[in-house]
Image (cartoon, rainbow, N blue to C red):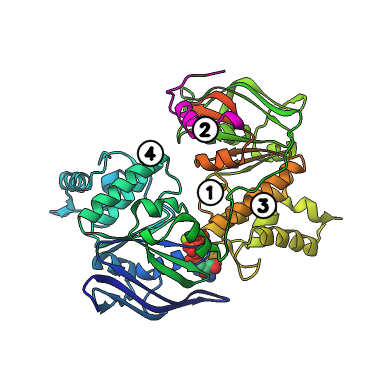
Amino acid sequence: MSDDIILNIQNVTKRFPGVTALSDVSIQIRRGEIHCLCGENGAGKSTLIKILSGVYPWGSYEGHILYEGKELKLGDRSIRQAIEEGIAVVYQELTLVSDMTVGENIYLGKEPVEHGSINWDKLYADTQQILTKYNLDIQPQAIVKHLGVGKMQMTEIAKALSENARVLVLDEPTSALTEAEIDKLMEILRTLKEHGVTCIYISHKIEEFFRIGDSITVLRDGKVVTTQPAQALNVEKLVSYMVGREMHERFPKGNRKPGEVIFEVQDLHAQDPDHADHEVLKGVSFNLRKGEILGIAGLMGSGRTELVMTLFGEYGKITSGKVKLGEHELKVKNSRQAMLEGISLVPEDRKRHGLVLIQSVLKNISLANLDQFASWFRIDDAAELNASMQFAKSLAIKAPNLHVPCDSLSGGNQQKVVISKWLMSKPKVLIMDDPTRGIDVGAKYEIYKLMNDLTEQGISIIMISSELEEVLGMSDRVMVMHEGQSTCTLDIADATQEKIMALATGIAQVLS
Ligand SMILES: Nc1ncnc2c1ncn2[C@@H]1O[C@H](COP(=O)(O)OP(=O)(O)OP(=O)(O)O)[C@@H](O)[C@H]1O
Ligand SMILES: [Mg+2]
């Protein structure tokens, strides 16, 4: 065995009731490399990470993991133990305490104590030292909830590094980051590599692997398909390993013929509901045609999510402007009313707004739509199950059956459940806020196909997306937002990545 291998994963199998999440997995991770882990939703990536980090302790899986040549045996206080061993994980969901400062979060539970009380000067000085060492641009005293997602992510990384991590695991770190923030993260990873930190990197944005990865392991259905040097692969090869077949196009061709304007927003202004002096929408105008997909592009913080949440009655206080559906003016006060009017929203923050995690997959899909199955005050269970099954099938939701709770599903599969729920509600206008975030390439394609089907049936879709390729690949027109305003709406034929970026960053002014 060569000294170069820091982690030697040998024949690891992990079973859950009804599911074998990992089956005979062997992977060798070299010291100081960036090892990418990829695979479809439910392939077993997070499960492997949870074994490495002690969430599932030694004895709860079969096989061996040699760490620095010795068997890793994480016991009762295993998560703490893994950290002490130098294995740190930044999870798919952020775990920071939002009301605390960056420094407090980094040293949570291990605050420097002197004469029985916390030495705050030392805590903040140490924090600054870590931030400087790894070139992280954050203020130690900043309150976490006031940071953007990108900086929260950096805080998580700093927290992991504060324990002298030798292996840093990042589980989908970029799913909520903007392009600029991703660039920054890539830079940080290179810095870490210079410091000799070994990195395991999970993502659904496979282009990233080729920017920073040294080797790539593909998992499918809990098994290793292949491990190869990144140079030996390319996007097409990798995708075919992941999905087990060749994929020739990323965006299915639709046959859309957008009709008359059915939804219109005129010079909308709205305030932050908690801070009346803060205007979040400063003049947004656009329209949406029947059977059309309108993409909304813009940087994080440009007001995209605030806009759609306001239209859905769940966020901003409208101070002026008009929203019209057909001929009548809408005054939506809450999401229930919005749904009755025929507007549905697949929210960005699915954990908070979209799912009841302890409830079954079935109930999560059908709950908002029970009236479809009600007859004479009873719910037609068979119809409910049938309809839900159809969505589960067409989106390939991976679950042993529809009665298991949502929190036993992998991250991406949970998202598919939320999407099913809103698709089932058959709205007139379907708003999707970053609908494919964290979803694998194969399932993305299925969601795009569904979007095409829906629009062909006459449903109109507003789609927010941070991935410009997706906006360009799926929309008929693109509305670009900048600092709470709509800048202009481009026909897809005239839209390019450069134009959209110029409008989104405010370099280009309103052209039309
Ligand atoms: N606590 C659990 N109980 C039962 N089944 C589970 C549990 N955790 C994971 N699974 C199942 O194990 C399989 C692998 O899940 P895992 O979360 O590792 O996937 P993943 O590759 O991380 O997917 P994603 O890309 O969607 O995050 C899935 O079929 C999932 O439903
Ligand atoms: Mg996962």
Which of pointers 3 and 4 indicates the residue nearer the eye?
A: 4
Task: Please name the residue that numbered disc 3 is placed on.
Answer: 421
Q: Do the residues labelled 1 and 2 touch (CB within 8 Å)?
A: no
Q: Is residue 223 left or right of residue 143?
A: right
Q: Distance between the residues labelled 3 and 4?
A: 32 Å
Q: Visible in this render: residue 99?
A: no
Q: Is residue 278 magenta?
A: no
The C terminus - image quarter: top right
Amino acid at pointer 4? Ala
Indicate the secondary structure of the residue bearing disc 3: helix
Foreground residue among 470 and 82: 470
Between the residue at mark 1 and the residue at mark 2, the CA separation in whole angstroms equals: 34 Å
Residue 496 is tagged as 2
Name the residue at 19% across, 47% down. Answer: 133
Q: Position of residue 475 (x, y in %)?
A: 62, 37
Residue 35 placement: quadrant: bottom left
Point 39% across, 71% down: residue: 51
Decide which of tag 2 and tag 3 comes sooner along the chain.
Answer: 3
The amino acid pointed to by label 1 is Arg
Residue 18 image point, x, y percent: 58, 76
Which residue is label 1 attached to?
352
Q: Is residue 349 above or below residue 204?
A: above
Q: At label 3, which amino acid type do we have?
A: Lys
Report the span colored magenta: 491-512
Would you say the beta carbon of the disc 1 residue lies within 8 angstroms of ligand 1?
no
Q: Which residue is drawn at 61% across and 53% down?
A: 445
